[in-house]
Amino acid sequence: MFDKILIANRGEIAIRIMRGCKELDVKTAAVYSDADKTSLYTNYADEKYALGNPSPAKSYLNIDKIIDIAIDSGSDAIHPGYGFLAENPAFASACEKNGIKLIGPTSNVIQEMGDKITSKKLMKKAGVPVIEGTPDGVTDIKEASKIANKIGYPVIVKASAGGGGIGMRAVYEEDELIRAIESTQSVASTNFGDSTVFIEKYLERPRHIEFQVLADESGNVIHVADRECSIQRRHQKLLEEAPSPIMTDELRNQMGESAVKAAETIGYSGAGTIEFLYDNGMYYFLEMNTRIQVEHPITEMITNIDLIKEQIKIAAGRELTLGQEDVVVNGHAIECRINAENPLADFSPDPGKITGYRSPGGPGVRLDSGVYMNYTIPTFYDSMISKLITYGRSRNESIARMKRALNEYIILGVKTTIPFHKAIMKNENFLQGDLHTHFIDEHKKGIDKEMENVILEDLERVSRLKSTFMPAKKIAAISSAVGSYLTNAKTQQINKKR
Ligand code: MV4
């Protein structure tokens, strides 16, 4: 086992990784930028090292600096978490060159999976279902038109490099094809320095279902079940659940077998995720993520497997002690991402000081967070405050617990996505498990209306506190904090009602 692991990340995931290290009796080293001097995670580490300048490029993305710190601190491994240097082949190769074990796959595997054309080819060859489309990049418009006609419209033009749906364009008729190709090429070129694009059949309302895999360095591969991640906004996940509401044992065996094949065929090692689009009874490989993901806790809850500890043990060269038969799905888990954003103003970020904080608890509630009362959320990084995870024996129980936990959760000083999640918990389509990747767009009106209702309910709850223990001044402050989500017009309407 490693003696010391450097955690090349910040916030809740740094804490989550350190928790795994503690349980394995491995020492930890944290890195922090000037903006993270007061961040909670640095206190969980045995040692901490300054990165200086808060800009991501100069701190958490600074490969040379992080490698130097790993060497100077005597760390024998680096855990990259998610984002930042996770999935950066240059970073993986720098670790390899310096004899530091990166907790993740090899640089070569990261590179191959980062290129969508390459990964799709590898999967097709391995017999994993892929969406019909051009096998290579398209440059010739005539050729592209011919293929698009053969596939049948709508088609989608995607960039081979990068990810996160950047530049991709759905095309409904031949007339639009040229412009879509040119636009995707141009966006891909600016963003990734690679203008290669490809075309495939466009699925209009698919579900996003992903499989967790674990692979050791001896070639043993298992899948650790599925997650449903269809509720996204501009390719940012907001809420995930495990298992998918549509999952059956049969479908899980089938998709799980494809996921295992996918990992096997590329010689994967570590924890990874195989993303699929599910449409009309069929599923197709979309992308592979070669990192631990934000939403890993829901898988941990339903399988009782500690994915972080498994990652570390695999990187230390141990063989998996879990066989496929040891992965038993039990119950249901939901994760709500609590971000400092105003969900009633296009999810615009609202970083700042947390002036009031009370976290939820009780049966089936897990909260992975990196914040505390009076903490100021820096403006330099993502706006996630915490991940609220609830577990139940059934989907309904996990939903009931999520509703309760969201109502217990008090965050003052910044606007959060809590009202959004409360609205989702009441949405009839969500309750039915009727989900797809355009869920939020399609139900925006209803969700917005429901958010206004829950904010009104919160105001009522605050006003009821008056008769119990809180001074009037405090009540007024909370009341105005809750009301600040709404537009001025709406607030006036509420004030009249009160
Ligand atoms: C698609 C698709 C429909 N048909 N490909 C979005 C991100 C990128 N990784 C791939 N994406 C999509 N690819 C075909 N052929 C729909 C999406 C998509 C999506 C996928 C997963 C989760 C959320 C999404 C939201 C919008 C579009």
Image: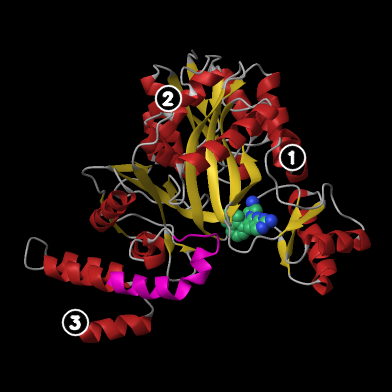
Q: Amino acid at mark 1?
A: Lys
Residue linked to disc 2 = 326
Q: Nearer the viewer, mark 3 or mark 1?
A: 1
Q: Name the residue at 16% across, 71% down.
A: 463
Horizontal and vertical percent for residue 136? 84, 47
Q: Name the residue at 74% across, 40% down.
A: 124
Part of the protein shown in magenta: 434-455
**Mark toward the start of the polypeptide (3 vs 1):** 1
Is ligand 1 less than 8 Å from the beta carbon at label 3? no
Q: Amino acid at mark 3?
A: Arg
- Element at label 1: helix
Q: Are marks 3 and 1 in contact (CB under 8 Å)?
A: no
The quadrant holding residue 138 is: bottom right
**Mark toward the start of the polypeptide (2 vs 1):** 1
Name the mark on residue 498: 3
Q: Is residue 60 visible?
A: yes
Camera-nearest residue between 103 and 476: 103
- Element at label 3: loop
**Mark toward the start of the polypeptide (3 vs 2):** 2
